[in-house]
Amino acid sequence: MASEDPKLQEAIAFLQKTNLNGESVYEQLAKVVGKVLDEKPEDAVDLLETSVIAKKTAFKPADPPLMAADPKNVATAVALKELYCAPKREIDPESGEPIEPEEGLLNNFKSEDIVGDATMYQAVGLGLSLSEMYGVMLAVKRLGEDPKRKCGTVRFFGKVLGTNGDYYVFETAINREGDEPEAPPETPAGEIPPEPAGEGSNEYTYFVCSHLGGAFVRLPDVTPKAVVAARKIKKYFTGDLDAPVWSYPSFPGNEAMYLRAQIGRIASATVVCPAGYLVEHSETEDGPKLLVEPGSEGFEEVEPKYEEKEDLQEMREPVNWTHRYRYLKKQGRVETYEPPEDADPDAAPVEPPEPDVDPGLLSTLDGDTESECVDWGSCVMEEIDGSAQKQPAWTSCTSSNVVGVKNQTVAIKSMVWPGAFAVYQPGPKFSNCYVGYGIKNAPYVPAPPPAVMTEAEEIPKESDALPPKAE
C-alpha cells in the first residue's frame, strides 16, 4: 500500500517537524487545504497567498501578564538567603583568592541550644516551627559574632506579633569591660530617673529585627515613665518602630519605647527556672547578689541546691518554679528611687513612691495568682467550684499523657501574659520563650479624666476714667 511506502513516511515525518513556536509545514498545509475546501475561491491555485493569510490569521494565545513582585517580599527573601549562606569573604586583588578571616576578629559569646529548645517547643505544641527556629539560630549567631555589638550572651526572647509586621526579639548582655560608663540621660525635673545601663530594669539590652536575616535594631533603655504609661493602655503593635503610639493616657515615646516597656514587663513576670537551679551568690558580704549556676565556670565552690524530681509530673506544679528576674515595681524601676534630701527646692518635686511589695529574687510561682505585684498577679475572674475566683496565673501541660513515656517534656504557660511559656526536660534542660501580641490578660479600665482645675481669680478691670488733674 501507498501508506507503507518508506519514502512517503519519511516525507510526512519531515513535514511534521515543528519549529520553536510549535508549528509545522504539515499542519500549515492542512489548514490551507481546509481553507480552500471551506471557502472554495475562484482562484484557488494561489496557494502561497492563501498559506500566508492562514498563517497570519491563526490564533495565538497571548502570554499571561507577569505580576510585579513586591519589593518588600523580594528584600525579605534575599536577606533570608544570605542568612543561610556562608558569609562573603573579601577577595585579595593580587591573588584573586578569598582572604581568610583573622583569628579573634569575631566576638565570643554564649547562647542557649536554640535548635534543641525548638524540639521541646514542638513536643508540647508551643513556640515556632523547627525551620523558623533554625533561622533564629543563624540570626543569634550573626548578632553574637558581631564585634561591634560586644554581646557577652544572646538569648532568643521570642516573637512579638503585630498588625502589619512582627518583631523577633533578642536579649543580650553587653560586655562593658574596659569601656567608659555611659553617661545617664538627663531627666527633666520632677521625673524619676531611669536605671543605668546594665543594672536593674536595664540589665539586658534588646535587639529586634522585622524578619530573619534583616538588620538588627537596638531598642532604647526603658524609663520608669514609659513603664508606668504602658501599664495604663492596651495597644497592638504595628511593626513600625518609628510609629507614634496614639492612646489615652498619652504614651511618652514611639513604638520602639512602647515595645521596650512591654518586653521589660513580660520578662519580669514570665522568665522562670526550676526551683533550686540558680542560687544567690555574693563575692563579699556587702557586695551585690548575683544569680549563678552552682558548679559552672567560676562558681565551682558554690554549693548546689537543685535536686531533680523523680516524678516529672511534679514539674507541673508552680511551686517547683521560681522567677529569674527582679520585680518591676509600680515606680517603673527595680530599685526604688528616693529623691535626695538636698534636692533643689525650686525644682518640681518628685512624687514619693507608692507602697509596694518586693518578692525578691527566686520567688516561687505558686503565689503569683494572688500576688500584689502589678505584672505578676492575675486580674481575670472565673467561676471555680460555684464561686468567683481569680484565674490561675499559670497552667501546665505535658507532651504525652501516657505513663512511662521516656523523654517527656513539661510546659508551664502564663495566663497573665498569653504567649509566655517555659519548657522542661530531665537533665535538667529548660527554656523560656514568648510568642504573642505583647498585651496583658486583664480587663481594660479606662483612665479617669484628670481633676478639674481651679478657676483663676477674677482680675480687676482697668478703669477708663482719666486720672485727676493736679491742682
Image: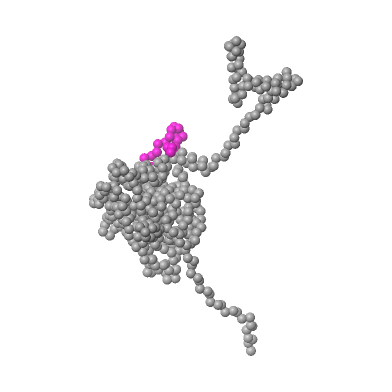
Main SS of the magenta part reads loop
Tell me where residue 262 appears, x and y as whole percent: 43, 55
Looking at the image, which is closer to me, 330 or 64?
Answer: 64
470 lies left or right of 267: right
The residue sitting at the bottom extreme is 471
What is the quadrant of the C terminus in the image?
bottom right
Quarter of image, res 50: top right
> Where in the figure is residue 295, as x and y percent of width and height?
26, 48
Q: Nearer the viewer, residue 345 or 241?
A: 241
Query: Which is nearer the eye, 45 or 89?
Result: 45
Q: Which residue is drawn at 36% across and 43% down?
A: 123
Residue lying at 64% horizontally and 86% vertically, measured from the top left: 469
The location of residue 248, given as percent across then percent down, is 49, 61
Q: Which residues are the magenta region?
A: 84-108
User: Is residue 138 something that shows in the picture?
Assistant: no
Can residue 31 be seen by looking at this rendering?
yes
**Residue at left offset 59%, top offset 36%:** 65
On whether residue 88 falls in the magenta region, the answer is yes
User: Residue at the front extreme?
Assistant: 386
Report the residue at 42% width, 58% height from top. 442
Viewport quadrant of the N terminus: top right
Horizontal arrangement in the rendering, residue 274 relative to residue 50 (left or right): left
Q: Where is residue 271 in the image (x, y as percent from the top left)?
A: 36, 52
